[in-house]
Amino acid sequence: MKYFIFMSVMMMGVSAAYAHQPVMDMAPRWEDGYGFQIRQERYGSDILMGGDSEIANPLGLERFVSKTWFEGVYTFDRSARVTFKLPYIDQDRVKNVGGVGVKQSNKGIGDIILGLPLKYYRNRGAYTENFGFTPSLRLPTGSSSGDFPISDGSTDLGLSFSYSGESFKYYSLIDAFAWLNTEGAHGMREGNEYGLDINLGYHPYHDNDTNSGAFVMWDVTARYNDDPNDATMTTASGGTRIQTGPLAVLYKDNIMFRTEYKYPLYEKTNNISNSRGHEFNIGVGVTF
Amino acid sequence: MKKLYKNLLTTLLVAFVGVSTLSTAYSKDRVTVNENETIIIVNGIVCSFCSQGVTKKLSKLPFIDSSKYTDGIKVDIENQKVIVAIKSGAHADFEKIFASIQSGGYEPITAHTFDGQIITPEDK
């Protein structure tokens, strides 16, 4: 049965690694383990930024994005996994078109991300740590048509280097990554993206008898995006941002529930564009 | 403002290093083994969600008493112990126990039996 599910996933087009994700990153670390996660991500704002300041927004420009991710992972052994991440995107914006605020919207399947997380584990008594390297590929499975396309139609390469360590009470992760974006459909080219994530976590409760518990974490996310070219009509925009906020995970046996909030601590746009705004994530995952 | 972000990043990195260099010593709890059980000390088993594989692999062994605990296995992540329930009268195959834990993503260190034996993977 597990091979049927795995092969079905592979045939859908399979994977990438995600930081601070119990399903995908922490588990499964056993041979022939696999897992799935459904996660919803929402962000957006009607605040208009010019550089690092909010500016007047007489046209009411705004952008709101909702992504529902279906993600899966298969572990060959703890040092090698394959992952996939497939979004369904529902996006709306009001864009300045010739001095008029024009409402645009689109929805559909987005670009699939396939990943090959490679990990080197070291166990040190009451502490376990791993060093990770994850090459990823983003394939243009989303539509690049219309005036507000879901995808830029390009094939992109992602590289991530990470370290995470964990004791019974504490968790830490640092992840540096880059997405190298190539030119896609209609001459669109989203700029490269560079990022750094730092997470510190605390495990306040665990019950060995019921195999259930909770942990909380604080996340700091820093991103720099190169400018997209003028042909790009997707949500991509250039600039720097730092977001931070808490996340919480509840787990029972092989099921976990995860929720996350990120606050835009600092934003600087290279051109006039909307703030990314507050970001919410909620997800449920299971491993086998 | 830049100074604030620099200070924030420095604080986080210091906290990160602090967490990463926490004590790695095993719990000093004495290993007390019940009848028809064995206790395995497992290196780095501190995360319940990550250690499901150990339960999954061990519970498939034919001499495990699955009527106890979760499919015959209890993982104590605070003390890095895996308690394995053995069927009454059955012979525990420690080579298979150690191999199952390794397949579950961890390294077994020692197995402690009810009659006071301490077995290591090197013994097998």
Image: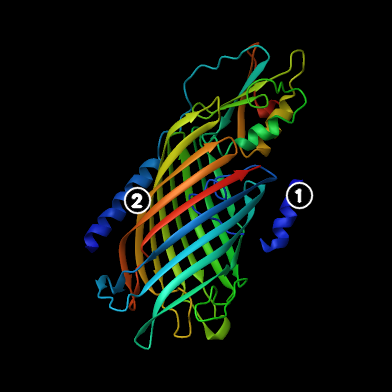
B36, B68: nearer the viewer: B68
Q: In terms of image quadrants, where is residue A93?
A: bottom left
Could you say which disc has been placed on residue A3 in the image?
1
Q: Amino acid at mark 1?
A: Tyr
Identify the secondary structure beneath mark 1. Answer: helix
Q: x%, y% of residue A210? A: 55, 27
Badge 2 marks a residue whose secondary structure is: helix
Q: Residue at x 53, y 64 (%)?
A: A159
Q: Quadrant of the N terminus of chain B?
A: bottom left
* Residue A276 percent coordinates (x, y): 38, 66
**In this view of the protein, can residue A281 be seen by the observer?**
yes
Distance (Cα) linking label 1 and label 2 = 42 Å
- Judge from the rendering whether residue A244 lies leftward or rightward of residue B62; answer left or right: left
Q: Position of residue B11 (x, y in %)?
A: 29, 50
Q: Nearer the viewer, mark 1 or mark 2?
A: 1
Colour logic: rainbow
> Disc 1 vs disc 2: Cβ atoms closer than 8 Å?
no
Quarter assignment of residue A169: top left
Tell me: residue B46, above or below residue A69. above
Which residue reaches farthest bottom? A98
Residue highlighted by disc 2: B13
Question: Image quarter for residue B110?
Answer: top right
Where in the figure is residue B69, as x and y percent of width and height? Answer: 63, 23
Q: Quadrant of the C terminus of chain B?
A: top right
Left or right: B42 in relation to A99:
right
Which residue shows up at 53% across the image and 86% down it? Answer: A187
Instruction: Chain letter for mark 2, please.
Output: B
The amino acid type of the residue labelled 2 equals: Leu
Q: Chain of mark 1?
A: A
